Image: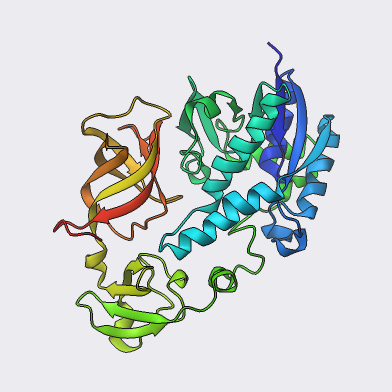
Amino acid sequence: MSLRILAAMSGGVDSAVAAARVAEAGHDVTGVHLALSKNPQSYRTGARGCCTVEDSRDARRAADVIGIPFYVWDMAEEFERDVVQDFVQSYAAGETPNPCLRCNEKIKFAAVLDRAIALGFDAVCTGHHVRKIDDRLVRSVDEGKDQSYVLGVLTREQIAHAMFPLGDVTKAEVRQEAERRGLMVADKPDSHDICFIADGDTAGFLSDRLGSRPGAVVDSSGEQVGSHDGAHQFTVGQRKGLNLGGAAQRRYVLSIEPVNNTVTVGERDELAVDTIVGTRPVWSGSEAFASPQPCRVQLRAHGETHACRAWESDGELVVELDAPAHGVAPGQAAVLYDAADEFVLGSATIIRTQRREHTPA
């Protein structure tokens, strides 16, 4: 059955091949590029590009080769509000957000999908490396490029209206296919880092937005061991750039307290946590767990997964790890997978953790 598909085209090789595959399958495909900045020159360009003028041109050329209509949608206002401001506010609150995850949730699979459905499209197609089986997200066959974690926040309805044509191929195979199809982006490097921070200086970007807020760096006993210009410059688990001097260089950030503007540091063992609590749980691949159920959890993009038991309690996701994890940062997503580590079960945003001795981390 032929469907009307809106292909989100970032200007990279993955989304171009995804759109070409869907068009070749006989669907009625329209390409769209998202303009996410009112000042595109402030975003990354070249090999590190994402959503720039250069990428828009690459996407248009790919659409021409595929032979599909192409449009540019201005989503700058939504992106600034739901991704950039959320990123800044999360750091101000002592959290470590993942802006790519938030962009997928709020822009590509909320604002764009809503608009697509309103315009009569049946689904949105993207170049994410993930599979969809029975409207459930499943890891890509390319483990190194799997993006199921950053899509773990999607709802069942959003997944039902999404197409992921690249989940059954590796990135190397995607590039080979792009070359066979005559797509000029076949050798275009992948985008990296945060697209809206042009020079890659996250601390500088946050300081420009939040200003200087000097405060104390203390050890786990409460003794001051240093100072800082803003707690937003740190993340839980961070070791480099603490500027403590001497043996203190072996210390890690244990917690960030935005109210009193204090950063607490300590030894690596003090980072260990075995209980994680998340807010706004989403169950896309399972019914909500009313009691502890064995599964696996991933706590950062491209990070390892941990055996655990998880359940929902009073509107929060509770995850008990079989073995302690280190450097778990509030603001990141906890994405649950089945015991085989293949199917996404659900997710939540981490708000607090607990150490083995059961004191707040």
Residue drawn at the location 53% of the way across and 44% of the way down? 145
Q: Quadrant of residue 25?
A: top right
Taking the image as shown, residue 293 lies to the left or right of residue 238, namely left
Residue drawn at the location 52% of the way across and 46% of the way down? 101
Q: Residue furthest top?
A: 1
Choose between 217 and 243: the one closer to the eye: 217
Q: Is residue 243 visible?
A: no
Choose between 138 and 272: the one closer to the eye: 272
Choose between 325 and 71: the one closer to the eye: 71
> x, y (%) of residue 128?
59, 38
Residue drawn at the location 54% of the way across and 53% of the way down? 99
Q: Residue furthest front?
A: 259
Instruction: Say if 244 sits above or below 90 in the image.
Output: below
> x, y (%) of residue 339?
30, 32
Instruction: Say if 16 sits above or below 269 in the image.
Output: above
> x, y (%) of residue 87?
53, 57
What is the quadrant of the C terminus in the image?
Answer: bottom left
Q: Residue furthest left?
A: 357
Q: How many marks?
A: 0
Residue drawn at the location 50% of the way across and 60% of the way down? 89
> x, y (%) of residue 11?
74, 46
Choose between 5 and 191: the one closer to the eye: 5
